[in-house]
């Protein structure tokens, strides 16, 4: 039997990797206010290591340097608004200088990754073992009705709000905040809406979906109070970073699959550095805990 030719792997150029990422998360699907795409990088440079993370902060850039990464892919933008300086004396300017000094490119996929199929909320649902039924806010440009913001999900077996909160606390990355709950901890949950990142602008859509619970992040006092007044909806509030971190693993797996298919010599990594800004939590000793159990 004739010997089969051995396929040779080669390092892709940044332009090739970016094209693959743009195919997964097209920039035109981002919100108009968003800032996505390649921030730093030479299109002709070779890429052999890629690091995925939520935040393009100095700790993550330092991790990319130590890893020897050629490309950092983050969910959050570096510059969401315009700037007049990238001086290294500024927080974000130092990030830019470090990236350029070490030939590390930066690419951002934000609301375009939120709307993707699969996207940020699919990864969040997967981390919680929820079965995705449909988008919470469908993308009107998607004829298949699979893209959009948030996801409406079902549980294989009903859980109480307390049990669902405990599952979220166990499955999502640990943060100082943990999981805050608004609602009856003993109420049964069969359907759940999820949205990675800030989600209290979606309350109208959540109510329209008729779900039993909504898990998201950055819930504020007044929107929560109003939402609770309108319905028995249970609300679970996790840390912003924790709800979006599962996407890093999903995105890394997607790029890994592309790399194998294209025959690229590419190693893909996911940062486990916690960049949630909150570092500690002190529970109030004179009040019940958030799930209604005695201290």
Image (cartoon, rainbow, N blue to C red):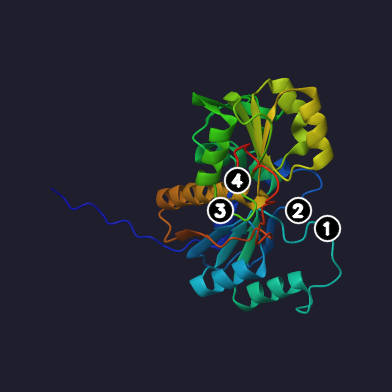
Q: Which residue is mark 4?
A: 295
- Going from N to C along the chain, the mark reached first, 3 or 4, is 3
| Mark identifier at residue 174 | 3
Question: Label 3: few (<14), some or many (≥20) within 10 Å?
Answer: some
* Residue at mark 3 to residue at mark 4: CA–CA distance: 21 Å
* Residue at mark 1 to residue at mark 2: CA–CA distance: 8 Å
Report helix, strand or loop for mark 2: loop
Q: Which residue is mark 2?
A: 35
Q: Residue at x 77, y 49 (%)?
A: 34
* Residue at mark 4 to residue at mark 2: CA–CA distance: 45 Å
- Going from N to C along the chain, the mark reached first, 1 or 4, is 1
Which x, y percent locates residue 245? 58, 51
Question: Residue 29 occupies which quadrant of the picture?
Answer: top right
Asked whether 128 or 104 is in front, the reply is 128
Q: Residue at x 54, y 40 (%)?
A: 166
Of the two numbered discs 3 and 2 in the rendering, the one whose residue sits closer to the viewer: 3
- Going from N to C along the chain, the mark reached first, 1 or 3, is 1
The answer to whether residue 147 is visible is no
């Amino acid at each position: 039997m004739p010997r089969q030719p051995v396929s040779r792997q080669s390092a892709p150029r940044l332009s090739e990797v970016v094209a693959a990422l743009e195919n997964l998360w097209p920039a035109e699907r981002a919100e108009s206010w968003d800032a996505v795409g390649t921030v730093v990088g030479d299109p002709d440079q070779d890429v052999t290591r890629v690091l995925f993370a939520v935040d393009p902060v100095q700790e993550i850039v330092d991790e990319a340097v130590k890893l020897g990464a050629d490309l950092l892919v983050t969910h959050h933008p570096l510059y969401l608004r315009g700037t007049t300086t990238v001086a290294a004396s500024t927080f974000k300017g130092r990030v830019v200088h470090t990236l350029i000094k070490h030939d590390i490119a930066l690419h951002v996929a934000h609301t375009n990754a939120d709307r993707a199929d699969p996207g940020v909320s699919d990864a969040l649902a997967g981390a919680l073992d929820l079965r995705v039924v449909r988008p919470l806010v469908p993308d009107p440009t998607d004829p298949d009705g699979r893209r959009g913001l948030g996801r409406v999900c079902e549980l294989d077996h009903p859980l109480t709000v307390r049990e669902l909160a405990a599952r979220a606390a166990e499955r999502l990355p640990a943060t100082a905040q943990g999981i805050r709950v608004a609602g009856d901890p003993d109420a049964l949950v069969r359907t759940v809406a999820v949205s990675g990142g800030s989600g209290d602008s979606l309350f109208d859509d959540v109510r329209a979906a008729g779900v039993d619970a909504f898990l998201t992040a950055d819930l504020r006092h007044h929107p929560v109070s109003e939402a609770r007044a309108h319905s028995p909806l249970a609300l679970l509030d996790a840390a912003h970073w924790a709800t979006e971190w599962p996407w890093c693993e999903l995105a890394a797996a997607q790029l890994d699959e592309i790399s194998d298919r294209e025959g690229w010599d590419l190693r893909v990594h996911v940062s486990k550095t916690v960049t949630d800004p909150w570092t500690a939590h002190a529970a109030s000793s004179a009040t019940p805990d958030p799930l209604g159990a005695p201290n």
